[in-house]
Amino acid sequence: MSDPLSLNRRNALFLAAGGLAATGLGAGTARAQGTAPAEAGSGSGSGSGTEGEAMGVDDTRPFAPGWRRFQIGEARITVVLDGVRPGEGPFPTFGEDQTQEAVGALMARNGLPRERFVNFFNVVIVELGGQTVLVDTGFGEGGRANGMGLLRARMEAAGFSPGDIDVVALTHLHGDHINGLREAGEPAFPNARYAVGREEMAFWTSDEARNGPRAENARAVADNVAPFEARTTLLADGEEVVPGMVARAAFGHTPGQLAFAIGSGETQVVLTADIFSQFVISFQRPDWHVRFDQDKTAAAETRRRFASELADSGAAIIGYHLPFPGLGYVEADGEAFRFVPETYQSLARG
């Protein structure tokens, strides 16, 4: 092979999950964020004074340097970790309709703490057909005091400037996906067009959203998304973001959430947004309620539908909240499913 990044699907995914991409193949030198050593969520994250500093080698944040790159078919994909959030849980956020004991027991059977978990925030950059597409934007500058909002610095370390982004595609309009759209009051990605689900935008700009229990998030949409209306394409199920990247309806978590399917067949990866938000519960107990799912019944139906399709097809997935880099497969397991992270199995299979 003349191009070291032109790998077959399985070996390309292996390189990404194994971290070889972090050596900087095809992207210059990998650099870690230049901040003082800090625990995740410690409050010493990158602020405006550190973001422009040179990226050093002293980043002790979990999963530094915080990006992985791989290639599937004609798409080059970079996953950037906007941050991690350890905390109490997963109950009652996950398994809201269950008991602490039931949720804790499931976690323990999977070798995890009963009452502590970690949430991940994986932003994806897709290079396809001469276009560079950023999928979601993380917490932005407002999250940096809490160790989040690392996208801007880490995408620079991965070889991207904000001006390189041609399209910002939003899976849905919750704050952890849209708050990175603006920086110091200006567009964070000055050359970008935008794409968002038609039904998603309609809901968050409606009187119901503005005047109801979700009014705070509706204000965030008004501040961060609505100003770009003239440059925004509203997407329906089956429509393309760019050629080769297709929106798929994934309603339930929000009224108009979208997943994005890139490629097809043996070279397909599906960006599953918040369909699967916890790598044990979302798959092994897909019918359990999730606190942040707006329509819990529809969200559970969406989880089961996507999990079944993905288990049948063998397509790879990247989940926004799955353990970084969020890359793996769905395996059927009786009446439920399991998430199988990409580790070394690709190399073993050849």
Image: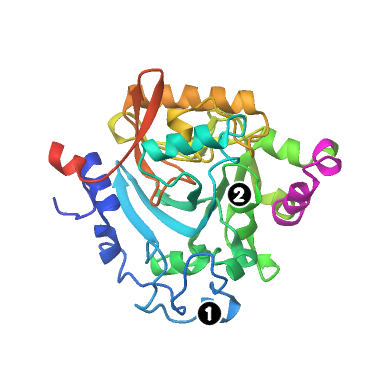
Residue 74 position in % (x across, y down)? 32, 44
Q: Which residue position is annotated with label 1?
A: 50
In this rendering, position of residue 177 left or right of residue 200: left
Frontmost of labels 1 and 2 is 1
Corner quadrant of residue 341: top left
Q: Which residues are magenta?
A: 208-225
Disc 1 marks a residue whose amino acid type is: Thr
Asked if 184 appears above or below 274 in the picture, the reply is: below
Disc 2 marks a residue whose amino acid type is: Tyr
Residue 322 position in % (x across, y down)? 44, 45
Q: Quadrant of the C terminus?
A: top left
Residue at far top of view: 335
The alpha-carbon separation of the residues under discs 1 and 2 comes to 28 Å
Along the line of sight, the residue nearer the viewer: 187 or 328 = 328
Residue 147 position in % (x across, y down)? 54, 67
Within the magenta stretch, is there residue 124? no
At 76% across and 47% down in the image, what residue appears?
218
Residue at far front of view: 101
Asked if 347 appears above or below 162 in the picture, the reply is: above
Within the magenta stretch, is there residue 215? yes
Q: Secondary structure at mark 1?
A: helix
Q: Which residue position is annotated with label 2?
A: 194
Residue 135 position in % (x across, y down)? 51, 49
In this rendering, position of residue 279 left or right of residue 298: left
- The answer to whether one can see residue 247 in this image is no
Q: Earlier in the sequence, mark 1 or mark 2?
A: 1
Please tell me how crowded label 2 is: few (under 14), some (14-19), or many (20+) other residues with Cα within 10 Å. many
Q: Main secondary structure of the magenta part?
A: helix
Proximity of marks 1 and 2: CB atoms separated by less than 8 Å: no
At 37% across and 66% down in the image, what residue appears?
65
Along the line of sight, the residue nearer the viewer: 95 or 225 = 95
